[in-house]
Image (cartoon, rainbow, N blue to C red):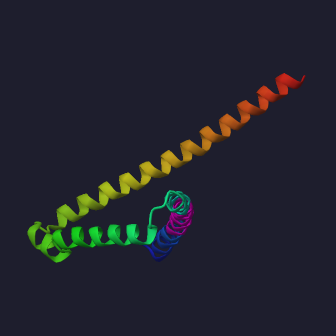
Amino acid sequence: MTDKEEIGKHKGAVETLLHEKKELSRLLQIVNSQLQKRLKALEKAGIDTDQYLEELQQGQQRQRKQQPSKQQRSSQSSGSQENKQSQRRRQKRSSNKVKRQRKQRRNTSQDDNDDEERLSEDLFE
């Protein structure tokens, strides 16, 4: 692979990762907004949300302790190079599938907006 190809590959990866980071940030904002909404509703219903959240976190910590560590899992797996390459291919296919789904949703959303505009134009003519 030439230097230019290598640079192009890395630039493309950086652009993709920045886009994914932006999407993840947007999703996190949505989740946090919904979380705050639900917590306020629980407080309104008389639930001590601080205690509830603490209990949830403790339960999650217990679950993590029960799961084998990464080192234990890696020693259990074959660790072959072929297996790792196979995992990378699956992850890449999955990532590409998600990108296609997002693009399709954007296109569908745009089509819906176009349909709504046509309907409103027909109604007011």
| Residue 111 drawn in magenta | no
Q: Observer-nearest residue: 90 or 110?
A: 110
Residue 43, above or below 57: above
For this view, does 19 lie left or right of residue 57? right
Quadrant for the C terminus in the image: top right
For this view, does 95 lie left or right of residue 82? right
Please, what is the dominant secondary structure of the magenta stretch? helix
Query: Residue drawn at (54%, 63%), measured in percent from left and top?
Result: 36
Q: Where, by quadrant of the figure, is residue 105 drawn?
A: top right
Q: Which residues are magenta?
A: 17-33
Query: Residue drawn at (41%, 55%), measured in percent from left and top?
Result: 95
* Place of residue 1 in the rendered image (x, y in percent of width and height, measured from the top left): 40, 71
* Place of residue 46 in the rendered image (x, y in percent of width and height, measured from the top left): 48, 61
For this view, does 108 lie left or right of residue 86? right
Q: Observer-nearest residue: 110 or 119?
A: 119
Residue 94, above or below 46: above
* Place of residue 83 in the rendered image (x, y in percent of width and height, measured from the top left): 18, 61
* Place of residue 93 in the rendered image (x, y in percent of width and height, measured from the top left): 36, 52
